[in-house]
Image (tube, rainbow, N blue to C red):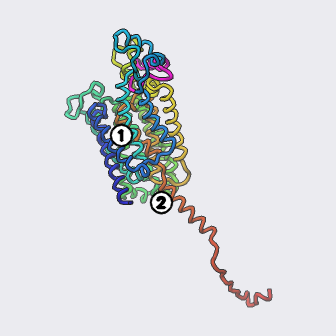
């Protein structure tokens, strides 16, 4: 049974590799055909998972409730109700009058709760890839998850190199992919450079976490020739790995700078600071660089922060910035009008023109605030799911943070948690999670972060068990004591 199960999980693993590689390549999956292919891959993974639910669907209760709620919300919005009841729902009066004026539906017609049912159905299918990725990754063994992390970092390197080449070559370069948002800016295969920034800000903490794990776990006890041996570490296999992780992190940060995204640069600075708080002390102790590692890490991060501050001021021009506040205000107005039911998942671009200010003459397809748009579309159920998801994320840190030595996978989990946190913050000013590729990578890193680290806990339990056994061990037989005379006087005479 073990071999079929291993081959079965490997099949899911290779489909996940295909998903991670394909998702960002064609406008981040934001075109009909690439999104359709991502949904087909997700369906294949889902079918395989449902064949052995007892082996693979090992999500805890809170995770199951969240996944089920996210699927159930658009399904409920597609349920048809009588027109008389539909008219009583919040925000439906004006649309009811429009339907009556154009003679689309009669009084006896049944209508879906959503104001844009076909958009809600599309949103339901678009939810499938990230939810399946989360459920599949969290049930993979650690070795496979680390391989998937390397695949994700490889895609980050590809996007960084391509976007920097585009920036250097301008709009005439053969690698340039024409779009109205990325002219003379690092955009990679993305349509919008801000969304590329969201992609990279999720992954650069993972690369630097692997760097910290490689350096922080290499122990060094000798005193003589200390600095020579510390420098010789760079020539070892671990040193080469550390160099590769450092190059990946620096490349991603450099690309983030050239995206000229204010939120991306600001969150990069925040991410570096959080990485410093999490890993700096773990670069000290008796590892290869000792206390010097902590000091060097602090100096490097502060230097980068100081260097990024003027770049943030220089690249802080955003043509949508002035309009965003009007979009926020009017979106909030719509969210209140449709509260507590909501307009329907995916209905925002169809319904928002009803609230759009006269001063904004462009088509607004998103609220530039994922949380506000979710409440606009889903009402109270969406608000509950958002709060429950944030609570699950917070509990993940409580479970992850333990004292003592960390193994490599826990470093990766901490880096993934920081990357998830950065995109959660970015979602206050953009719509990264409405892009299929970013949603898939977000779900992937969230699964890595929330993965139960059974292997490390088992090692710790075995180690503590051996320690307890040694303490409580009692000799099987008493050892006879040999009495020797002291100073030539028998012990019987003392």
- First in sequence, mark 1 or 2: give its number: 2
Residue nearest the viewer, comparing 221 with 118: 118
The reply to whether the magenta stretch includes residue 267 is no
- Identify the image quadrant of residue 133: top left
Kindly indicate the quadrant of the structure image that contains residue 258.
Answer: top left
Q: Is residue 293 above or below residue 422?
A: below
In the image, farthest residue toward the front? 108
SS under mark 2: loop
Residue 285 location in percent, x, y? 52, 54
Name the residue rendered at 46%, 44% in the picture. 449
Residue nearest the observer in this picture, 390 or 12: 12
From the image, give the main secondary structure of the stretch colored magenta: helix
Kindly state the secondary structure of the residue where label 1 is placed: helix
Q: Residues within 10 Å of mark 1 (few under 14, many from 20)?
A: many
Q: Residue at x 38, y 60 (%)?
A: 1
Of residues 453 and 253, the one nearer the viewer is 453
User: Disc number at residue 252?
Assistant: 1
Q: Which mark is residue 220?
A: 2
Q: How many marks?
A: 2
Q: Position of residue 108 (x, y in %)?
A: 40, 16
Is 335 within the magenta?
yes
Q: Is residue 382 visible?
A: yes
Residue positioned most to the right = 493
The magenta segment? 322-347
Camera-near label (1 vs 2) is: 1
Is residue 333 visible from the viewing direction of this image? no
Residue 143 lies, in percent from the top left, at 39, 54
Q: Quadrant of the C terminus?
A: bottom right
For the point 73% across and 88% down, the residue is 487
């Amino acid at each position: 049974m073990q071999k079929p199960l291993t081959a079965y999980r490997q099949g899911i693993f290779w489909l996940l590799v295909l998903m991670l590689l394909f998702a960002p390549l064609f406008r981040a999956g934001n075109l009909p055909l690439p999104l359709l292919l991502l949904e087909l891959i997700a369906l294949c993974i889902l079918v395989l998972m449902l064949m052995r639910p007892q082996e693979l669907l090992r999500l805890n209760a809170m995770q199951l409730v969240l996944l089920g709620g996210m699927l159930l919300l658009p399904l409920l919005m597609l349920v048809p109700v009588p027109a008389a009841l539909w008219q009583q729902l919040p925000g439906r009066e004006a649309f009811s009058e429009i339907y009556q004026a154009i003679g689309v539906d009669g009084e006896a017609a049944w209508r879906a709760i959503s104001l844009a049912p076909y958009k809600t159905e599309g949103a339901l299918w678009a939810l499938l890839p990230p939810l399946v990725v989360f459920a599949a990754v969290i049930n993979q063994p650690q070795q496979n998850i680390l391989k998937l992390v390397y695949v994700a970092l490889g895609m980050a390197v590809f996007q960084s190199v391509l976007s920097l080449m585009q920036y250097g070559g301008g709009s005439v370069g053969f690698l340039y992919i024409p779009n109205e948002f990325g002219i003379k800016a690092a955009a990679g295969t993305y349509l919008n450079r801000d969304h590329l920034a969201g992609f990279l800000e999720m992954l650069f903490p993972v690369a630097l976490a692997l760097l910290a794990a490689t350096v922080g776990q290499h122990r060094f006890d000798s005193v003589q020739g200390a600095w020579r041996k510390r420098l010789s570490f760079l020539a070892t296999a671990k040193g080469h790995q550390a160099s590769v992780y450092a190059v990946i992190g620096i490349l991603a940060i450099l690309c983030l700078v050239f995206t000229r995204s204010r939120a991306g640069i600001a969150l990069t600075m925040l991410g570096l600071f959080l990485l410093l708080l999490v890993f700096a002390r773990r670069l000290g102790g008796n590892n290869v660089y000792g206390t010097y590692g902590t000091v060097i890490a602090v100096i490097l991060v502060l230097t980068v922060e100081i260097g990024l501050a003027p770049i943030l001021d220089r690249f802080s021009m955003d043509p949508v910035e002035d309009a965003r506040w009007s979009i926020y205000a009017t979106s909030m107005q719509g969210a209140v009008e449709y509260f507590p039911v909501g307009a329907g998942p995916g209905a925002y671009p169809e319904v928002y023109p009803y609230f759009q200010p006269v001063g904004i003459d462009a088509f607004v397809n998103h609220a530039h605030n994922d949380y506000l748009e979710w409440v606009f579309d889903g009402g109270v159920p969406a608000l509950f799911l958002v709060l429950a998801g944030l609570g699950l994320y917070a509990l993940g840190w409580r479970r992850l943070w333990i004292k003592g030595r960390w193994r490599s996978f826990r470093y990766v989990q901490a880096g993934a948690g920081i990357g998830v946190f950065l995109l959660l913050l970015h979602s206050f000013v953009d719509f990264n999670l409405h892009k299929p590729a970013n949603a898939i990578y977000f779900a992937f890193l969230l699964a890595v972060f929330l993965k139960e680290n059974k292997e490390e806990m088992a090692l710790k339990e075995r180690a503590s068990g051996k320690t307890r056994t040694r303490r409580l061990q009692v000799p099987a037989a008493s050892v006879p004591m040999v009495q020797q005379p002291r100073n030539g006087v028998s012990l019987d005479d003392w």
